[in-house]
Amino acid sequence: MARKLLVCSLLILALVSMIYWNDAKAQNQVKIGTIFPLTGPLALLGNESFEAADLAREMVNERFGGVWGKKVVFIKADAPDPTSGANEANRLITHEGMKILIGTYSSSIALAASAVAERNKVIYLEVIASSDEINQRGYKYTFRTNESAADLGGTAAVFASEVVAPTLRIDSKKLKIVIFHEDSAYGTSVGKGVKATADRLGLQVLAYDNYKATSPDLSSIVLRFRALNPDVIIATSYINDAVLFWKTCKQLGLRPKALIGTSAGYGIPDFARLLGPDSEGVFTSEAPALVNPAALTDKAKALDKEFRERWMAKKGRLPAGHAYRAFTGTWVLLTEVLPKAGAMDPEKIREAFLKVDLPYGSLPHGLGVKYAPPGNPNAGLNERRIAGIQQWQDGKIVQVWPEKLAVKRWTAIPLPPWK
Amino acid sequence: MEGMILQLFVSGILLGGVYALVSIGLTLIFGVLDVVNFAHGEFLMIGMYAVFWLCTLFHLDPYASLLVVTPLLFFFGLFVGRTVIRQTIGASSAVQIFATVGVSLILMNGALVLWKADFRSVPTAYGSGALMLGPVFVGYPQLMSFIGAIVFSAMLFPFLRYTYVGKAIRATAQDRRAATLMGIDIQKTYIFTFGIGIALVGIASALLAPIYSIYPGVGAQFVLVAYVAVVLGGLGNIPGAILGSLLIGITETFSGFFISPGWRQAIYYAVFILVLIFRPQGLLGQKQ
């Protein structure tokens, strides 16, 4: 009995001292929670997105010694789906005491996690996900630096109308397009953006379809489109389905004059890797990446150069749109917002967000920063965001539009016949 | 229009063949062991990775790797059957569910740790090629997987009918106690059947690897449809599973074209529910 008492008291002593020890260590660090899908079906891009954000953190610690003189540390959480997104957000806030959460790549997970953050009056910074809804719920603590679904979708439609139609010598109001998108929050948002802009510009929308991203087969969609014979297909897909769709098009003999993807599957290196030469000429509406340095401020040029070099050293390839989004979103938080806030206080950080005012060209991919104030229908969203058009040329993604960000001219309008 | 209907029919049959490859093993396992194998899709994923590594490291053509991957998965199935599945036979369904879901999670996340989440593909010269039979496009790899489904299930029937092991399996499926009384070693039969079920998945993985990207979550794409096909056809009934798969493939393709791609799954689930209302034992199942 006496022994049991001794063991118990030692355990309690150990626990108590651990708590104090952690606290003491914590004084010298700035802790920020991160929520990304590090496992599960989105793991590929979830991990890369986290790595891009983490690179920003590393560089800030190296260059500036961190924030407020303390090193920045990420408390990382894994959320493969919306339910765990909400649970992990809860855990980070209540058990780890986080006042800022960075996340999450996927719109569905973002909506869940940011709702938890808002309830707890904790800052939620989205760095990649694009669903418009994220900033349309009247939340005061949710901020987003990257372009939204409406931008991605709208830009694809604008490109079809302003570039593809004239190049094909077709009147833009006679251009026949089909729109299809995967049916989660992300795809639906972007699809809506395409449709709204396409209608506004007077393009002829022959079909507006959705499908499940995990479908093992897309031949019925391809056959349906083949019967409609569109000039342009605007697609919103994740990587697996994007590849399956284009392969099925080849098998069943569907070749539109242009295929414009919208970020996600169409914008990542695996698209070219899995399709090989069949990827040539495909467009994607995407956060700008590897843009023309003439569009950037000198500071941004230098930052871009370092970012590209370090990403190449880490991953063996150049950064794509999602990596730029995660990197710049985190960079702005750590180098502009937190210094202005002065302390880990959500109210002060909120106000600091609203004070940031950087012109276009200040970020390595050409964006500026000015978060919409409360009362704006997109409160918390960056007003100086851009979505551009990239094209797969020779297995590489190249910025081709808008002209000021473009590195090369577009090719392959119309796409040559299948080889 | 007739040309399009024919094309849809052919595409539907080919898709059904893909589903059938995965369902046959599942129905065999369920019919004999009475165990719902929630890890079925993950065995498919492991098989596909095996095909990928054989192709990458030894330049083995995926269709040739079938001869390696099938026995590989058979032994892997025996191993899992002996260690995990055997303990769940006759236990409550909660135990079965937890055990097989556990296996599924271990396999999926093990693959994620070992091989990362990148999408791999197995390149074949005829990868995206298609044959033209009249007005109909028939994709080479889809045709191969359909032929494979027919050939291997055809081989399964004489095995089950004429060999001792096959008869033992059928006896166990019919009546466990009677089979024990007849001197059949039930435990061995269970494990062996599980091994065969997984070997069938191995065949499927070699035939499907040229069509789909390979990543840790790829199994989940197929397994849900496989369950529907299995129940639709009648649990434990192999021709039923094939019929169910073809029916789903055709329904899916036609509804995607005529109604809308977004409704495909809803339509075949609706067909599924209707069949179950009027024939709860499945299309070819025995009335209980």
Image (tube, coloured by chain):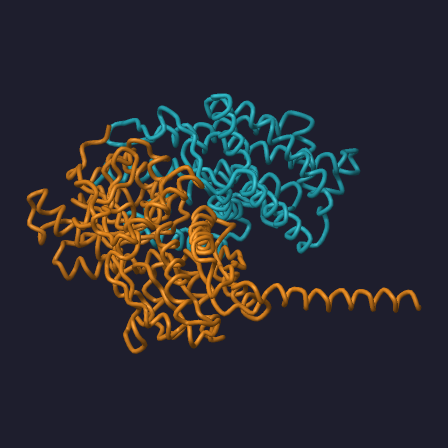
Q: Is residue B272 visible?
A: no
Question: Is B74 placed left or right of A89 in the picture?
Answer: right
Residue B9 in the image: above or below residue A138: above
| Image location of residue A184, percent across then percent down | 38, 57
Nearer-the-camera pick, A365 or A269: A365
Nearer-the-camera pick, A166 or A47: A47
Nearer-the-camera pick, A297 or A399: A297
Splitting the image into 4 quarters, where does residue B78 fall? top right
Which quarter of the figure is the C terminus of chain A placed in?
Answer: top left
Question: Is A158 placed left or right of A37 in the picture?
Answer: left
| Image location of residue B5, percent across then percent down | 27, 40
Splitting the image into 4 quarters, where does residue B145 fall? top left
| Image location of residue A89, percent across then percent down | 51, 65
Splitting the image into 4 quarters, where does residue A312 fall? top left
Q: Residue at x 28, y 40 (%)?
A: A397
Q: Is residue B109 visible?
A: yes
Q: Residue at x 52, y 50 (%)?
A: A39
Residue A12 in the image: above or below residue B29: below
- Which chain appears cyan? B
| Image location of residue B198, percent across then percent down | 59, 35
Which quarter of the figure is the N terminus of chain A placed in?
Answer: bottom right
Q: How many marks?
A: 0
Question: Is A121 placed left or right of A233 in the picture?
Answer: right
- Which chain appears orange? A
Q: Residue at x 40, y 28 (%)?
A: B123
